[in-house]
Structures are given as C-alpha cells and as structure tokens.
Image (cartoon, grey):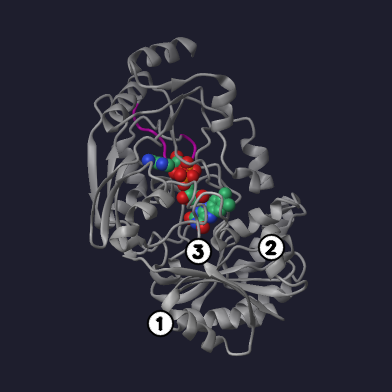
Amino acid sequence: SSSTLASLIADLGDIPTVTDAKIVRRRSRDFFWYSPILNEQLDGKSADLIVAPRDEADVVRVAAACARHRVPLTVRAGGTGNYGQAVPLEGGVLLDVMALATIEWTKPGIMRVGVGAKMNAIDTELQSSGWELRMHPSTKRTATIGGFVAGGSGGIGSVNYGGLREPGNILAARVVTVEEEPRIIELRGDAAQKINRTYGTTGIITALEMPLAPAWKWIDVVVVFDDFMEATAFGYEAALADGIVKKVLAPITSPLPSYFGALKPYCPDDKSILIAMIAEPSLESFKSLLGGRGTITLETPTDDSPGQVPLYEYTWNHTTLQVLKSDRSVTYLQCLYPHDRLLEKVAEMRDLFPDEVLQHLEFIRFNGRVTCSGLPVVRYRDADRLNEIIRLHEERGVYIANPHVFTVEDGSRYKRIEADQLGFKHEVDPYGLLNPGKMRSFTSTRP
Ligand code: FAD
C-alpha cells in the first residue's frame, strides 16, 4: 500500500530513490520481448520505486527496510537479461546496484570486484596487467559482472573455460540477506554456485571474486563457406586444435548473415559464415588449418571501445538481435548438443527444420568436452509449434534450455555443480521478498 511505501522511503533516509512512474516502468523491463510468450506474460509489470544504494552499507539498510515492511525487492543491474529475470512480478523496490562498481583488488589470475562493474570496464581496467575476464556475454559493453553471474550462463571465452557453472569459474561471492537484521555471507568455492543464475532470488550479491585468463591481442575474423556444415566442421577442428588460441567460434547459417547490417559487405549472399576471435600469434596456424576450405573476408583487431562494434556483437544472443532489428517475427531457442554425436545431430536438426530453425552455433567446453551450444533463430508461428520444436529436439538428444519461461527451475535444468539453491533461499530470504515468483519451488514458511 502507499502508506507502507511511504514508511519504507522514510526508513531509507538519504539513499537515492526514483519514484517517477514513467522511469520506474521503463527500468522494470529487460530483453524479455525476444520471446513472444514472455512478452505477453510480462508486459506492464513494474516496480513501485527504484532505490540506488551507493555502497554495501546502503544495501544492508534497504534490505532491512524491505524485510521490516515486507516489501518485495528485485535487483536490477544492466537490465539486459532475456527471460524477464529483472522484471518485478509483484512491484516493490527495484534495487539498482550499478554504483557498486569498484574493483577491490587484483592479483595474477584473480580479482575481487563490486557487482555493478560493467564487464567491458573490468577488462579495460585489467588490460595493463596482462589479464582479462575468462568469459563474458556478448552484452559485455552494457552488462555487469553481477548480472552475468546471477542471470547468465557463458559466452565469449566459454570455448576455453566452459560456462559459469564449471567448477572454478566463480571463486567467491558476498551476499546480503533480506531480514530485519541483514547478515553478510561470504560463499567460497562450489558454495558460490548457490547464487549462480538464480535471478537474484538467493540474496543480494555485492561483490564477486572471479578467476582471470591471460589477455591476448584478439583478432576478429569472418570466414565464408558455401555450406553451413562445412563452417561447422571447420569450427569443430579449430575448437579441438588446442594449440590455436581462440575466444569465440560461431558458425552461422545462410541467410542469417544477410541481416547483419554493417557486417554485410563481408558476408556474400547465400553463404554461411564462421565468426572467430583468434589470438594474433595463432592467426597463421588458424589460416593453415583452414587451407582452401573457406575464404577470410574480414580480419581486424577486436575493438570494443565506444562507437565500435566488435564482431562478438554478432555472436551468442546478439545473432538473434541482429535479425530482430529488421524482422520482429522471429524468436530463438537455446540448445545443448551431445558432444559425442555433434556434427551428426547438427545436420539432423538442420534437415528437420530447414527454413524454420535457422542454425547458429557456439563452440563451448562442457564438462571438459568440446561441443556446441546452439542459439538458432526460429521463425515463430505460435506457442504450440514452438513447444513441438522443443520436443522434437529433446526426443533426438538435443537438450533445450527454454528461454520462453521466467522461473529459475524451468529455464535450465542442466547443472554441473549441485548447489542447494532452494535451501539457501530459505536461509537468506525467509519472507520470500527477493524477486518473488521467479523461484517456483519456494514457498515461505514464515509469516
Ligand atoms: P540484469 O539483466 O540487470 O540482471 C540479470 C539477473 O540477475 C536478474 O534476475 C537480476 O535480478 C539479477 N541480478 C543482477 N545483479 C544482481 C546482484 N548484484 N545480486 C543478485 N542478483 C542480481 N547471457 C549470457 O550468459 N551469454 C551471452 O552471450 C548473452 N548474450 C546476450 C545478447 C543479447 C543481445 C542480450 C539482450 C542478452 C544476452 N545475454 C547473454 C543475457 C544478459 O545480457 C547477460 O546474462 C548479462 O550478463 C546480464 O547482466 P545485466 O547486468 O544486464 O543483468
């Protein structure tokens, strides 16, 4: 009620807030509109106010006030999630954590950083030390490290290190609980998986300790092939070639590159392409592995400084975005291919839906094996057909992490480390105030 909100605001003292309904409504959204299904379910959902803590002490005060007044609290960082992760279903506070962006310390191979730091800013800051993040989503220029850990899965770099769920890819997390007297909990090692991809339902993360990778001078490369399976077969060889240092390998079928705006001059009509990021000293070996099988049309240092469009912004879920820019009738899926029948399964799926599911793959490591994550662009008919396409994949051994659902449990059941996320939620959020509705299996046992 409005009197509850007024007493909450009074308790917040000088912590910055925004109550302008127009702004609050706009910031209560993310990229869920990629999904026609979520777009219907989540349209119009909004917080009541935005609260923007300046530091961890402010976060503790907001958490205490929300617990005292039983007001829901949903964390929002860059707001680039695809499943409505940051959309408050029951109003309340939208906690903008962007100000918690300080790098606390760095050592060789490891850093501790505030959750609001943008991943591009982190890598820029680390540059002179010779280290960089092991992996980042294709939204690196706008998304935060905290949003990635709480709402994402993997991305550029996962061809070497796997996803965030591989042991060792999140070293520690600091979490504020939502209780009348909030506690600060440090989760180390595998325990940090309790906050991985739980959409902010298992505590407010304030800082993260992340492992780093050696930084290279990366070269953006476009290779053109007559046939998508040739692009995939070569991508597979390059992924398996351990001596060739790479950060992304993304085969993309024709006609998707014809939607690629500024990249179109490098993508001849009716051809499939492979987008790669290769370390400069490995470029010669990469070309020699390629031989005469494909044609390199672009080769330029990766540049993600302001005003530039790095090639990785055509990979991962940016591939879908590039198509959506001119065709709002498409949507997408997220697939995980079996590593032992990879090329066979990719070909099978292509033959099953030649014009309806347009393939785009990302080579990744999963449990030590090289395989592909697929983010195909789907020509959308209706929800029934989409569910049928999902079923036809799963029946044939291609696992789907459904991007058309908004709960933690329904989105992805494939976990590398079993962490008791539900049990931890009971510990840190006894009243069920954190992003309510997103952890389906949770029911509060406290009044
Ligand atoms: P937000 O969207 O603000 O938040 C994400 C979730 O985390 C929300 O549930 C929020 O409540 C929670 N959260 C955020 N901060 C905290 C915190 N401090 N404590 C607790 N909970 C918190 N994802 C990938 O994994 N890989 C990709 O390659 C990828 N590519 C994408 C491409 C496009 C074009 C788009 C639109 C999205 C893509 N995504 C991808 C999804 C998303 O961009 C990333 O996961 C990104 O890292 C989210 O960060 P954010 O700062 O925008 O988080």
- Which stretch appears magenta? 436-446
Q: Name the spot of residue 322 as percent of width and height, x first.
A: 66, 56
Q: Earlier in the sequence, mark 2 or mark 3?
A: 3
- Mark nearest the camera among 1 and 2 is 1
Q: Is residue 391 magenta?
A: no
Cα gap from disc 3 to disc 1, whole angstroms? 21 Å
Kindly identify the amino acid type of the residue bearing the numbered disc 1.
Answer: Asp
User: Majority secondary structure of the magenta segment?
Assistant: loop
Q: Nearer the viewer, residue 63 or 138?
A: 138
Question: Is 252 displayed left or right of 187 in the figure?
Answer: right
Q: Give SS at disc 3.
A: loop
Q: CA distance from mark 1 to mark 2?
A: 35 Å
| Mark 1, secondary structure of its residue | loop
Disc 3 marks which residue? 302
Specify the quadrant that holds the C terminus: top left
Q: Amino acid at mark 2?
A: Ile
Q: Residue at x 49, y 12 (%)?
A: 2
**Residue 411 shows in this picture:** no
Q: Nearer the viewer, residue 109 or 1?
A: 109
Residue farthest along the top direction in this orientation: 3
Q: Tell me whether the residue at label 1 lies in contact with that at label 2, contact meaning CB atoms closer than 8 angstroms.
A: no
Q: CA distance from mark 2 to mark 3?
A: 36 Å
Write down the residue under mark 2.
Answer: 389
Q: Residues within 10 Å of mark 2 (few under 14, many from 20)?
A: some
Which of the numbered marks, if any, corresponds to residue 242?
A: 1
Q: Who comes first in sequence, dot 1 or dot 2?
A: 1
Amino acid type indicated by mark 3: Thr
- The image shows residue 140 at horizontal and vertical percentages of 48, 52
Residue at image coords 39%, 59%: 164
Residue 4 appears at what percent x and percent y? 43, 13
